[in-house]
Image: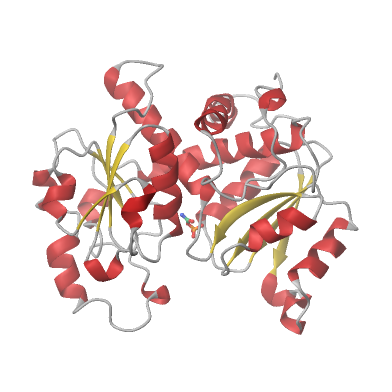
Amino acid sequence: MADAGAAAWVRKDLVGIEGLSRREIELILDTAPQFVEVSERESGIKKVPLLQGRLVVNWFFEPSTRTRTSFELAAKRLSADTLTMTVAASSAVKGESLHDTLANIEAMHSDLVVIRHGHAGAARMLAERHDSHIINAGDGYHEHPTQALLDAYTMRDWARQRRGDPAASLDGLRVAIVGDILHSRVARSNVWCLGKLGADVTVCGPRTLLPPAIERMGCRVTSSLPEALNGADIVYVLRMQFERQRGSLLPSVREYVNLYRVDEESLRHAPSHAAVMHPGPVNRDLEVAANVADGPRNLILEQVSNGVAVRMAIMHLLVNSPGPRAGESPAT
Ligand code: CP
């Protein structure tokens, strides 16, 4: 397997989408298909030696199913050694700082650290001071860059199949992002990512769940679900994040379901070809009807499958590029 784009990659870390160029995002998306092929091998070994002898550390301060397992599997498929840090069983509970913890991990020669943390900026702060490659697996309400990249990959693949054009881009694709935008790092990363790729993005939710001035990110904003779904190629449903909501932001869950649930009835406002996506975990029959989440329009498990390949591509580009070490380039 060739080094596939690594020569063109210049960043040490991946801490957000906001600072990436379209060319960089497309380099990641264009590097992923060879790793889809590795994961889909029916015979032979689902592994390549691109990270052989490297140490990848998974460091999650918040719960995760998809992202954590996907990174671990991606690292194993690249033949890396993997280490999972369980926060509850680490010295973080004794007050050890992030910097001190990472310095100790680096003393054991880590190469790449995947971190999810409740505070916005945690990944960037570590990236700026440490030599390991840092990947942000979600920081507070701020960004979840690898989710946006796997989503963009899934949308592009869907558009290419639908149009019968293996080179189709996301230019002009109409995407409606629906739900709890205010608490969603997935929404923020997706608005940046899809906007840079030329898609036409509308965010939709109750006014209390829309961040002030979100239209400055380059998206349209509405509180009308029928308006958002009208003409949408992709309906991207967000999880209702009750654990992050403080105070009563909704009159009632029943009212939210009546006005914003994506189900067979509300989807009548969308074109018949529209696909439904969700980053997971899904609150069945709350933000999306179970029969839609499981139905023929859904791309939810394709998102998960593509996540492994996209994360393999990111880890390969970060570790195998001749790019700078810490302190030599701004982290993004
Ligand atoms: N989409 C996502 O981040 O899911 P997890 O929280 O399970 O990782």
Query: In the rendered image of this protein, does residue 13 appear above or below residue 108?
Result: above
The residue that appears at 54% across and 53% down in the rendered structure is 67
x then y, percent, for residue 10 = 70, 33
45 or 6, which is in the foreground?
A: 6
80 or 316, which is in the foreground?
A: 316
Residue 304 visible (yes or no): no
Query: In the rendered image of this protein, does residue 234 appear above or below residue 240?
Result: above
User: Which colour assignment does the render follow?
Assistant: secondary structure
Total labels drawn? 0
x then y, percent, for residue 144 = 51, 53
x then y, percent, for residue 323 = 76, 34
The residue that appears at 68% across and 48% down in the rendered structure is 331
Residue 216 visible (yes or no): yes
Tell me: 5 left or right of 213: right
Looking at the image, the residue that sits furthest to the right is: 107
Query: In the rendered image of this protein, does residue 167 appear above or below residue 33?
Result: above
Quarter of the picture holding the N terminus:
top right
x then y, percent, for residue 164 = 31, 16
